[in-house]
Amino acid sequence: MNAPASQATVDAARQALARSIGLAAFVYGYPLTETYRTCALQTAPRAERRIGTSAGSDVRAPINTLHHAPRPSTHEDRDVVTPANDLLYTIAWIHLADGPMLLSVPAAARHPGRYFVLPLYDAYTENFENLGPRNCDPAGETVVLVGPAGTVPEALAAHRVVRCPTDLVWLIGRILVGDEADWPAARALQA
């Protein structure tokens, strides 16, 4: 027959269990916390925004609004970790709790040879969809973004529907660019 565990052993087991649960909660919740922090930073009213020291580095706009960065990122752009310096970014924070939103994917056929993609991330930073020339109509396409509990109005039923796992969606569009002489052509695709 085994002897009953001492109080010290029971306390040590409880402490180990609490630590394990706390660590799991941190690992689960950290992406969500960081996503909401970044969303708040990038959707703050203009008066509250921090404008970078280099021209055009502010990639911030109100919620449900596309913002097109006019130049590639530099070492001064620090809202997110290691942005690429050979891309023009289009950023949007999309809120779907009040209903679906329409997103127009540009016509790849009008920009032959220009790589672009519109990745969509959920509130946990999981990439759940990549819209672009590989999987969208070359003539351009409008997609309906719908939150997890959302419904698609009958008037939008003819469009492609993208079911989003969370009501907050982060669009981080990327367009490949060359040197500064190439920026105007990439901006035309952003527009």
Image (cartoon, rainbow, N blue to C red):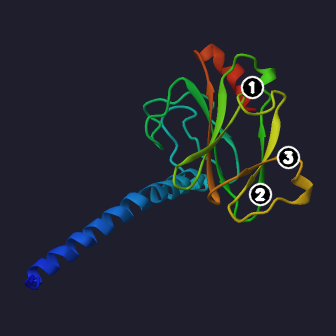
Residue positioned most to the right: 155
Expressed as whole percent of the image width and height from the top left, the position of residue 107 reads 80, 28
Q: Nearer the viewer, mark 3 or mark 1?
A: 3
**On the picture, is 81 further left or further right than 61?**
left
Q: Earlier in the sequence, mark 3 or mark 1?
A: 3
Name the residue rendered at 63%, 52% in the picture.
169
Q: Nearer the viewer, residue 23 or 96?
A: 23
Task: Give the SS element for disc 2.
Answer: loop
Q: Is residue 80 above or below residue 163?
A: above
Q: Kindly identify which residue carries mark 2.
A: 100
Q: Residues under labels 2 and 1: Cα distance?
A: 27 Å
| Contact between labelled residues 3 and 2, with CB atoms less than 8 Å apart | no
Q: Which residue is mark 3?
A: 159
Residue type beneath disc 2: Pro
* Residue at the spot of label 1: 188
When the figure is inspected, residue 167 is found, relative to residue 78, above or below; the finding is below
Lower position in the chain sequence, tag 2 or tag 3: 2
Residue 68 appears in which quarter of the rendering?
top right
Q: Is residue 25 above or below residue 130?
A: below
Residue that appears at 59% across and 16% down: 178
Which structural element holds mark 3? loop
Amino acid type of the residue that numbered disc 1 sits on in the rendered structure: Ala
